[in-house]
Image: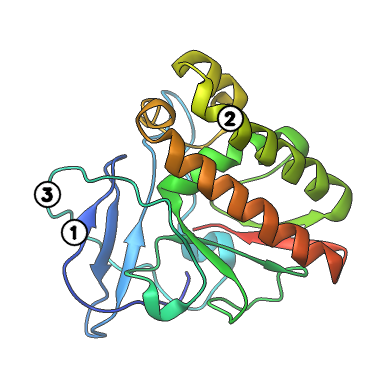
Amino acid sequence: MKRSSGRSGPRVVGRSGSVRGAALPGSGRSAALHRCPPAAGAPPRPSAARRRGGPHPVPAIRATGAPPTTVDYTVYRRTADLESTGYVEIGPGRHAGRHWQDGFLFVWADAFGMAEGIIARHLPGYDHFEMNDVPRAAGLRIIADWRAAADRLPTLDAAAAHAALDLDASYGCRLDDEPEAHRTEIAAMLGELADACERFYRDGEWVCMLGL
């Protein structure tokens, strides 16, 4: 389980029904539960603690019953700005077992679903819920496709945007309306991710993308 570094305060429920930043018991800090319902007949997913082999138990998260809110497409660069642990982390090098590091990017998990179809296109085995190391060759193809999608999104209809983002390969559920409703924000996020990851690859052969 990721350790929280976000601020305490009001929390909201994401568009996919996830609890964004419910409080960790007794800590005053926050965590997030972000899961799509499993497909019919699919085996249950292992707990976060089991997937990561971490020593910390998964906290009980209580849904607030609040209505869905707008997806946040901001690419954050400071942990002090994060509202919960419900963010994907992107940084230079292979994953070394640490989280919430200076120099990393942080994107709300729902929002990152708009980038993940393209990642999965070039990185077999990519998993939204795991720690992913992306080698340079695959990463540069991902960057090129992010930029191409960002350039085209403002002029695409819903079906074409869905295809350009390869959303059928994304983990995202119930977010199919996002590309048409928030094309400008998604394009800006993709462009910023592409520029930052390109800088990471100038200094090394790997970029890590750390899921929930």
In the picture, residue 205 is in which quadrant?
A: bottom right
Q: Residue at x 71, y 41 (%)?
A: 125
Q: What's the mark number on residue 66?
A: 3
Q: Secondary structure at mark 2?
A: loop
Q: Is residue 61 left or right of residue 200?
A: left
First in sequence: mark 2 vs mark 1: 1
Tell me if residue 37 comes above or below residue 195 in the rendering: above
| Residue marked by disc 2 | 165
Mark 2 → mark 1, Cα distance in angstroms: 32 Å
The mark closer to the camera, 1 or 3, is 3
In the image, what residue occupies the spot 52% across and 49% down?
A: 189
Q: Viewer-nearest of labels 2 and 1? A: 2
- Which residue reaches farthest bottom? 27
Identity, as a three-letter code, of the amino acid under mark 1: Arg
Measure the C-alpha gap from mark 1 to mark 3: 11 Å
**Rendered residue at 13%/55% (across/down):** 64
Q: Residues within 10 Å of mark 1 (few under 14, many from 20)?
A: few
Residue in front for this viewpoint, 68 or 141: 141
**Residue 123: in sight, yes or no?**
no
Judged left or right of residue 54, residue 92 is right
| Dot 1: element | loop
Q: Note whether residue 207 is visible.
A: yes
The answer to which of 41 and 114 lies nearer the viewer is: 114
Depth check: 74 or 88 in front?
74
- Say few, some or many: other residues with alpha carbon within 10 Å of mark 3 (under 14 / 14 to 19 / 20 or more): few
Spot occupied by residue 174 in the image (x, y as percentages of width and height): 35, 29
Is 173 left, or right, of 117 in this rendering?
left
Circle 2: residue type: Leu
Q: Amino acid at mark 3?
A: Ala
Q: Please give the label number shown on residue 62.
A: 1
